[in-house]
Image (cartoon, grey):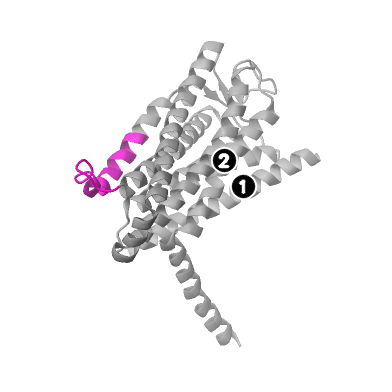
Amino acid sequence: MDLCVTIKGVSFLLQTGMGILGNTVVLLAYTHIVCTGSKLLPVDMILCHLAFTNLLLLLTRCVPQTMTVFGLKALLNDPGCKVVIYAYRIGRALSVCITCMLSVFQAVTITPTGPYLSRLKPSLPSLVIPTFAGLWLFNMAICIAAPLFSMAPRNDTVPAFTLNLGFCHVDFRDNLSYVINGVAVSGRDFTFVALMVGSSCYILLLLHRHSHQVKGIRRSQGGGAETRAAKTVLTLVVLYVVFFGIDNVIWIYMLTVAKVSPVVADMRVFFSSCYASLSPYFIISSNKKVKAKIVCTAEHEQPSADTQDSNDK
């Protein structure tokens, strides 16, 4: 196997494995919290949904990509390609939308209560599920072109205006369809990223302007939890924006050429999936609920293992 192919395959394998493990741990931790009777805050519900969408993205894009890199051919037929590509596009879209939702909800949460927010803040928990449903329906509509143009690779040649994903092709037939799809997807992404950055800048402004008040709230009302949550949100936003920028620089380049090199397509897949792979570890390290649940589970398993060793002796 060529050294370049080996490096690429190992990189995708590590990214996929780490991402699936991290997001699964976050989902299991939140599931255990709910099963023990604890109530999730809106931010926790959003983080849980973010882990689910990132897991969907990794399973539908990085897993088949890794298998293709290692030489597995004909993984999917035409219907399989349509389902997998559609699920991937929705997962990728929801990743940016839910990160934006997380930033906006956290900005509203830490905003000082005024006449307009006095009725909105108590209703935030009841708005989370409808917002999820709205984002799913919106992105299912935006991404509908993906299954229409997706197909299994026919041979080693790649037609013009076709995205070569390795395990599937997305053939847009002509330049107009290719550009319209690119503009629609990029327009949606840039809109949500702009809203995400704006709300994050507002969070930074509030944290800076009201640092003394926040310290007082921490002592009297537990405001420290909100501050920690805000810092987690800001970290996730910065992480997303960095990889979003790299992803879209490559995407804009891809829109300017008729035939996209497989190396360029692989680079875009890798960088666009970095957020899905790394974000759960930021959640685990900064979210006290998730971290405590993982530590508690580990400590519970350790005595059981010690007891089993003693019995074996």
**Towards the viewer: 67 or 39:** 39
Decide if residue 204 is on the left or right side of residue 244: left
Q: Which residues are magenta?
A: 112-135
Q: Residue at x 49, y 74 (%)?
A: 299
Q: Residue 243: x and y, percent?
A: 57, 38
Looking at the image, residue 107 lies above or below residue 294 = above
Residue that numbered label 1 is attached to: 15
Q: Residue 55: x and y, percent?
A: 49, 46
Q: Residue 100: x and y, percent?
A: 41, 39
Name, please, the residue furthest toward the right: 2
Decide if residue 96 is on the left or right side of residue 253: left
Cα gap from disc 2 to disc 1, whole angstroms: 8 Å
Q: Amino acid at mark 2?
A: Ser
Q: Is residue 168 visible?
A: yes
Q: Residue at x 53, y 44 (%)?
A: 239
Looking at the image, residue 77 lies above or below residue 239 = above
Q: Secondary structure at mark 2?
A: helix
Residue that numbered label 2 is attached to: 273
Density class for disc 2 (Cα within 10 Å; few <14, some 14-19, many ≥20) is many
Q: Residue at x 64, y 41 (%)?
A: 66
